[in-house]
Image (cartoon, rainbow, N blue to C red):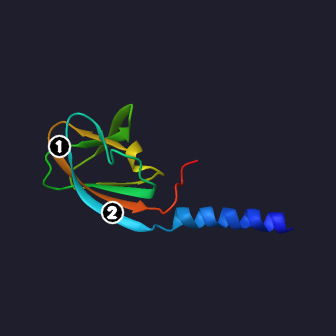
Amino acid sequence: IQNIESQLQQIVSKIKAYVSPSALNSYVMPVLQEASPLSPTPISIRRAVIYVTQDTAYVVYVGGPTGQHFPVFPGQSISIDICDASQIYLRSENYSYVRVLLEQTSQPTCN
C-alpha cells in the first residue's frame, strides 16, 4: 500500500506541474520568410498563445520544424497545448510581428 501511495503522489505531482503554470512569459517576436522557433532553446510550457498583430499585412504560418502550413491571419490568435516552446515554428511571406504568451511550467512535461 505504501508503494502505491508513493506512486500516486508522484503522478499527482506531475499532473500539478503540467496544469499549473509557474510563470507567464510574454514577448513580441518578428517573423520572417525563413521559419524560426518560438524559442531557440527548449522551454517547458503547458501552452503557447500566438497573436498576429492587426497591423501585420501578412499571414503567419505555424507548424513544426519540418513544415509550417497552418495559417493565422492578422488580428487572429491560436492557442497550442504543447510541452516545449522550441517545437513551434513560425514563418511569413514577409516581415511580420506576433505577440507570444507562454504558460511556463517548473518541471519538464514532455515524456
In the image, taking residue 11 as reference, residue 103 lies left or right, namely left
Residue 32: % across, % down: 19, 39
The answer for how far apart the CA atoms under marks 1 and 2 are is: 25 Å
* Of 93 and 33, the residue lying toward us: 33
Question: Vertically, is 104 above or below 71?
Answer: below
Secondary structure of the residue carrying numbered label 2: strand
Question: Vertically, is 37 above or below 67?
Answer: below
Residue type at numbered disc 1? Tyr
User: Image quadrant of residue 18?
Assistant: bottom right
Residue plotted at (24% across, 48% down): 73
Residue plotted at (66% across, 66% down): 12
Residue plotted at (15% across, 50% down): 56
Mark 1 in CB contact with mark 2 (< 8 angstroms):
no
* Of 18 and 51, the residue lying toward us: 18
Give the number of the disc on residue 58.
1
The extreme top residue here reads 66
Question: Vertically, is 1 above or below 44?
Answer: below
Residue 60: % across, % down: 25, 43
Secondary structure of the residue carrying numbered label 1: loop
Judging by the rendered image, the residue that carries numbered circle 2 is: 25
Residue type at numbered disc 2? Asn
Badge 2 crowding class, 10 Å Cα cut-off, few under 14, some 14 to 19, many 20 or more, is few
Say which of marks 1 and 2 sits in front: 2
